[in-house]
Amino acid sequence: MTDSELTIALSRGSTLFVRQYGRGIPVLCVHGFPLDHSMWRQQWEGLGDQFLFLAPDLAGFGRSILADDTQATDASLESDADDLAELLDRMGHARVVFCGLSMGGYVGWQFWRRHPARVAGFVLCDTRAAADTPEVARGRRVMAERILKEGMEILVEPMLPRLFSNATLTAPDARIFGLIQRMRSCSPLAAARVLMAMANRPDMEALLPTIDLPTLLLCGEEDVITPPAEMQQMAARMPQAKLQRIPSAGHLAPVENAALVNRAIREFLDRLPQP
Ligand code: MLT
């Protein structure tokens, strides 16, 4: 049983933190925006008896460090995907189940495009394959510039009602307050960089039929950012995908309804051949 934290300096200048917990099939869990590895705590605690969770912080988030020469402009999620591949090399994992939430899912598509042999299957939570509309991309670029000048609060406060279900918003517990606190303390440069990278990301919809891998899609019933209807369309286009809707959850289904999410992940991973 592994239970440790590593910090690994990568060749392109960033230093990634990764929490490892459990034993068995390695599951790489990539957080959403602007969160960090700790959003997966209930998954590694609930499922670590059977699966090995590797939960990194992407460059600049949580306890990871951006390369010194990082600029918010020209950012791409491809570089995050390559960071993760190098991290796995350094940890000795050839193949993993790629699990990502929202932005973590966007990174997952790029990981699959650039390192397809390393993906044994996908668990994709509350995410989408489509690129931003020009209007959304423009909004992200404006927000990136504002965050660099004004700090994280201008992003976090308006985002909260869109992240969570009614039940979570009505009775937030210490976990939710902790998560919000980590969003507020996110590095403005890291946030601005990935806002630019998300605005620049390519559309993956045409590639969905070519992703012939066991895939579990999970979506909070009340997710208004990446709604279930959109994820259902993704599932219909992916040869081996199945969507499970998660009640009492908004955009952060693994945090808001961990019991049901964990049951779905366990059933899915139980049926996978060892990578
Ligand atoms: C996330 O949760 O990672 C973000 O909502 C992604 C996005 O802004 O598209």
Image (cartoon, rainbow, N blue to C red):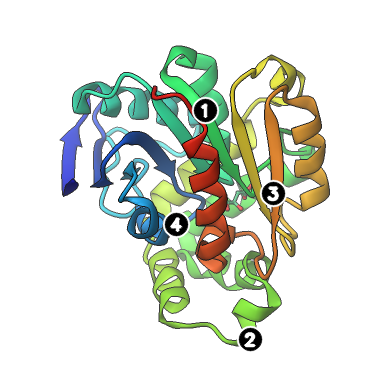
Which residue lies at the image location 68% right of the left edge and 52% below the top edge?
219
Q: Which residue is mark 1?
A: 121
> Disc 3 marks which amino acid?
Gln
| Mark 4 residue CB less than 8 A from any atom of ligand 1 | yes
Residue 263 or residue 127, whichever sits in front: 263
Q: CA distance from mark 2 to mark 3?
A: 24 Å
Q: Earlier in the sequence, mark 1 or mark 4?
A: 4
Q: Which residue is mark 4?
A: 35
Q: Earlier in the sequence, mark 1 or mark 3?
A: 1
Residue 15 or residue 56, whichever sits in front: 56
> Disc 2 marks which amino acid?
Thr
Q: CA distance from mark 1 to mark 2?
A: 35 Å
The circle on residue 28 is none
Which residue lies at the image location 37% right of the left edge and 21% below the top edge?
95
Q: Indicate the secondary structure of the residue bearing disc 4.
A: loop
Q: Which residue is mark 2?
A: 170
> Disc 1 marks which amino acid?
Gly
Asked if marks 1 and 2 touch (Cβ < 8 Å), the reply is no
Drawn side of residue 179 relative to residue 12, left or right: right
Q: Which residue is mark 3?
A: 244
Q: CA distance from mark 1 to mark 3?
A: 16 Å
Q: Is residue 215 visible?
A: yes
Which residue lies at the image location 37% right of the left edge and 66% below the top edge?
185
